[in-house]
Image: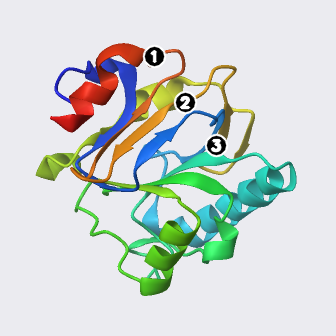
Amino acid sequence: MEDVDPARLICQSSKVLGNGRIQDLHDAVVVDFHRFERARSQEVARGVIYFNAKLSEKGTPYLLIGVGRWGSNDPWLGIPVAWDQISGARVIVEAGFRDFRVTPSQGSHFFQNLTAFQIGYFTVNPDAGEGFVDWQWLSSQPAVEEQGCVRQLHFAAPLPVIMNGKTSRGMIFKPDELSPAGTAQSLRQ
Protein backbone atom coordinates (compact mmCIF):
# COMPACT_ATOMS: atom_id res chain seq x y z
CA MET A 1 0.00 0.00 0.00
CA GLU A 2 2.95 2.28 0.47
CA ASP A 3 3.21 2.59 -3.32
CA VAL A 4 -0.17 4.33 -3.62
CA ASP A 5 -0.22 8.11 -3.31
CA PRO A 6 -2.69 8.96 -0.51
CA ALA A 7 -4.01 11.84 -2.66
CA ARG A 8 -5.57 9.17 -4.91
CA LEU A 9 -7.58 7.67 -2.05
CA ILE A 10 -10.82 8.44 -0.25
CA CYS A 11 -9.91 5.99 2.50
CA GLN A 12 -7.15 3.64 3.57
CA SER A 13 -7.15 1.30 6.55
CA SER A 14 -5.05 -1.40 8.15
CA LYS A 15 -8.15 -2.80 9.89
CA VAL A 16 -10.33 -4.18 7.11
CA LEU A 17 -12.71 -7.12 6.91
CA GLY A 18 -13.39 -8.45 3.44
CA ASN A 19 -11.39 -9.55 0.45
CA GLY A 20 -11.27 -8.72 -3.23
CA ARG A 21 -12.27 -5.84 -5.46
CA ILE A 22 -15.51 -3.92 -5.74
CA GLN A 23 -15.75 -1.87 -8.91
CA ASP A 24 -19.44 -0.96 -9.22
CA LEU A 25 -19.92 1.72 -6.54
CA HIS A 26 -20.99 5.08 -7.92
CA ASP A 27 -22.75 6.40 -4.81
CA ALA A 28 -21.65 7.26 -1.30
CA VAL A 29 -23.62 8.18 1.79
CA VAL A 30 -21.33 10.25 3.99
CA VAL A 31 -21.81 11.62 7.49
CA ASP A 32 -19.96 14.94 7.27
CA PHE A 33 -17.16 14.72 9.83
CA HIS A 34 -16.91 18.52 10.12
CA ARG A 35 -20.63 18.98 10.88
CA PHE A 36 -21.32 15.86 12.95
CA GLU A 37 -22.37 16.40 16.58
CA ARG A 38 -22.75 13.40 18.86
CA ALA A 39 -25.74 14.98 20.59
CA ARG A 40 -27.60 14.76 17.26
CA SER A 41 -26.77 11.15 16.40
CA GLN A 42 -30.48 10.14 16.37
CA GLU A 43 -31.10 12.79 13.71
CA VAL A 44 -28.06 11.55 11.77
CA ALA A 45 -29.44 8.00 11.94
CA ARG A 46 -32.70 9.20 10.36
CA GLY A 47 -30.74 10.73 7.47
CA VAL A 48 -28.78 7.51 6.92
CA ILE A 49 -32.00 5.47 7.04
CA TYR A 50 -33.58 7.79 4.46
CA PHE A 51 -30.68 7.39 2.00
CA ASN A 52 -30.46 3.62 2.55
CA ALA A 53 -34.17 3.28 1.68
CA LYS A 54 -33.85 5.59 -1.33
CA LEU A 55 -30.82 3.80 -2.81
CA SER A 56 -32.04 0.29 -1.91
CA GLU A 57 -35.35 0.94 -3.65
CA LYS A 58 -33.38 1.64 -6.84
CA GLY A 59 -31.11 -1.38 -6.30
CA THR A 60 -28.10 0.93 -6.01
CA PRO A 61 -25.24 -0.32 -3.81
CA TYR A 62 -23.30 2.40 -2.02
CA LEU A 63 -20.31 3.26 0.14
CA LEU A 64 -21.31 4.24 3.70
CA ILE A 65 -18.87 6.43 5.66
CA GLY A 66 -19.62 7.61 9.18
CA VAL A 67 -18.21 8.76 12.48
CA GLY A 68 -18.22 6.41 15.45
CA ARG A 69 -19.70 2.94 15.61
CA TRP A 70 -22.47 1.92 13.26
CA GLY A 71 -25.37 0.36 15.15
CA SER A 72 -24.21 1.50 18.58
CA ASN A 73 -26.81 1.25 21.35
CA ASP A 74 -25.14 4.29 22.90
CA PRO A 75 -25.77 7.29 20.62
CA TRP A 76 -22.72 9.04 22.14
CA LEU A 77 -20.48 6.31 20.71
CA GLY A 78 -21.86 6.29 17.21
CA ILE A 79 -24.88 6.20 14.95
CA PRO A 80 -27.79 4.14 16.32
CA VAL A 81 -29.05 2.22 13.29
CA ALA A 82 -30.18 -1.38 12.89
CA TRP A 83 -28.67 -3.65 10.23
CA ASP A 84 -31.70 -3.43 7.93
CA GLN A 85 -31.37 0.37 8.01
CA ILE A 86 -27.89 0.24 6.39
CA SER A 87 -28.30 -3.05 4.50
CA GLY A 88 -27.90 -1.44 1.07
CA ALA A 89 -24.28 -0.50 1.79
CA ARG A 90 -21.68 -2.58 -0.06
CA VAL A 91 -18.77 -1.10 1.93
CA ILE A 92 -18.99 0.40 5.43
CA VAL A 93 -16.42 2.73 7.00
CA GLU A 94 -16.31 3.51 10.74
CA ALA A 95 -14.07 6.49 11.50
CA GLY A 96 -12.90 7.80 14.86
CA PHE A 97 -14.19 10.97 16.49
CA ARG A 98 -12.08 14.08 16.83
CA ASP A 99 -11.65 13.51 20.57
CA PHE A 100 -11.30 9.73 20.78
CA ARG A 101 -10.77 6.68 18.64
CA VAL A 102 -13.49 4.25 17.71
CA THR A 103 -13.26 0.58 18.55
CA PRO A 104 -14.70 -1.66 15.84
CA SER A 105 -18.30 -2.79 16.16
CA GLN A 106 -18.32 -5.91 18.28
CA GLY A 107 -21.78 -7.43 17.78
CA SER A 108 -21.82 -11.02 16.52
CA HIS A 109 -24.91 -10.35 14.38
CA PHE A 110 -23.12 -7.39 12.79
CA PHE A 111 -20.13 -9.53 11.81
CA GLN A 112 -22.39 -12.37 10.68
CA ASN A 113 -24.17 -9.93 8.34
CA LEU A 114 -20.88 -8.54 7.02
CA THR A 115 -19.71 -12.04 6.18
CA ALA A 116 -23.01 -13.39 4.86
CA PHE A 117 -23.62 -10.43 2.56
CA GLN A 118 -19.93 -9.94 1.66
CA ILE A 119 -19.86 -6.35 2.88
CA GLY A 120 -16.47 -4.63 3.08
CA TYR A 121 -15.76 -3.09 6.48
CA PHE A 122 -13.07 -0.49 7.23
CA THR A 123 -12.13 0.84 10.69
CA VAL A 124 -10.20 4.13 10.56
CA ASN A 125 -8.38 5.83 13.45
CA PRO A 126 -5.79 8.24 12.01
CA ASP A 127 -4.46 9.24 15.45
CA ALA A 128 -3.54 5.59 16.08
CA GLY A 129 -1.97 5.17 12.64
CA GLU A 130 -4.91 3.09 11.44
CA GLY A 131 -5.60 4.72 8.10
CA PHE A 132 -7.43 7.86 7.06
CA VAL A 133 -10.53 9.27 5.39
CA ASP A 134 -10.06 12.26 3.07
CA TRP A 135 -12.82 14.31 4.71
CA GLN A 136 -11.76 17.50 2.90
CA TRP A 137 -12.18 15.88 -0.51
CA LEU A 138 -15.53 14.35 0.45
CA SER A 139 -16.77 17.72 1.75
CA SER A 140 -15.77 19.40 -1.50
CA GLN A 141 -17.88 17.07 -3.66
CA PRO A 142 -21.33 18.29 -4.70
CA ALA A 143 -24.17 16.43 -2.99
CA VAL A 144 -27.12 14.95 -4.85
CA GLU A 145 -29.10 15.53 -1.67
CA GLU A 146 -28.51 16.29 2.01
CA GLN A 147 -30.36 15.37 5.20
CA GLY A 148 -28.72 17.45 7.93
CA CYS A 149 -25.05 16.43 7.99
CA VAL A 150 -25.69 13.27 5.94
CA ARG A 151 -24.86 13.67 2.27
CA GLN A 152 -25.51 11.51 -0.78
CA LEU A 153 -22.77 11.77 -3.39
CA HIS A 154 -22.92 10.34 -6.91
CA PHE A 155 -19.98 9.88 -9.27
CA ALA A 156 -20.02 9.11 -13.00
CA ALA A 157 -16.92 6.93 -12.60
CA PRO A 158 -16.86 4.16 -9.98
CA LEU A 159 -15.19 4.31 -6.56
CA PRO A 160 -12.94 1.23 -6.73
CA VAL A 161 -12.42 -0.67 -3.47
CA ILE A 162 -9.60 -3.16 -2.87
CA MET A 163 -9.45 -5.32 0.27
CA ASN A 164 -6.81 -7.87 1.23
CA GLY A 165 -8.26 -10.37 3.70
CA LYS A 166 -4.82 -11.80 4.56
CA THR A 167 -3.24 -8.50 5.58
CA SER A 168 -6.48 -6.78 6.74
CA ARG A 169 -5.60 -3.79 4.58
CA GLY A 170 -7.76 -1.92 2.14
CA MET A 171 -8.14 1.16 0.00
CA ILE A 172 -11.06 3.08 -1.47
CA PHE A 173 -10.04 5.08 -4.52
CA LYS A 174 -11.37 8.36 -5.77
CA PRO A 175 -13.14 8.10 -9.14
CA ASP A 176 -10.84 7.50 -12.14
CA GLU A 177 -7.91 6.89 -9.82
CA LEU A 178 -7.40 3.12 -10.00
CA SER A 179 -4.59 2.07 -12.26
CA PRO A 180 -4.64 -1.69 -12.86
CA ALA A 181 -0.86 -2.02 -12.69
CA GLY A 182 0.76 -2.02 -9.29
CA THR A 183 -2.27 -1.72 -7.05
CA ALA A 184 -2.76 -5.42 -6.36
CA GLN A 185 0.98 -5.75 -5.74
CA SER A 186 1.00 -2.87 -3.27
CA LEU A 187 -1.74 -4.55 -1.24
CA ARG A 188 0.30 -7.74 -0.88
CA GLN A 189 3.13 -5.89 0.87
Give residue 146's position: percent from left, percent from top.
Answer: 71, 43
Residue type marked 2: Leu
SS for dot 1: loop
Q: Quadrant of residue 175?
A: top right
Q: Quadrant of the C terminus?
A: top left
Residue type marked 1: Glu
Q: Quadrant of the N terminus?
A: top left
Residue at 13 percent across and 52 percent down: it is 128
Residue hosting label 3: 151
Residue 150 visible (yes or no): no
Residue hosting label 1: 177
Position of 141 relative to 50 (above/below): above
Q: Is residue 66 left or right of residue 145?
A: left
Residue at 64 percent across and 64 percent down: it is 86
Residue at 41 percent across and 75 percent down: it is 76
Whole-angstrom CA distance, mark 3 to mark 2, is: 16 Å
Give residue 80's position: percent from left, percent from top.
Answer: 54, 75
Q: Earlier in the sequence, mark 3 or mark 2?
A: 3
Q: Are marks 2 and 1 in contact (CB under 8 Å)?
A: no
Q: 52 or 162, which lies in front?
A: 162
Whole-angstrom CA distance, mark 1 to mark 3, is: 22 Å
Q: Earlier in the sequence, mark 2 or mark 1?
A: 2
Q: Quadrant of residue 145?
A: top right
Q: Is residue 7 left or right of residue 29?
A: left
Q: Which mark is residue 159?
A: 2
Give residue 23's position: percent from left, percent from top.
Answer: 57, 33
Whole-angstrom CA distance, mark 2 to mark 1, is: 8 Å
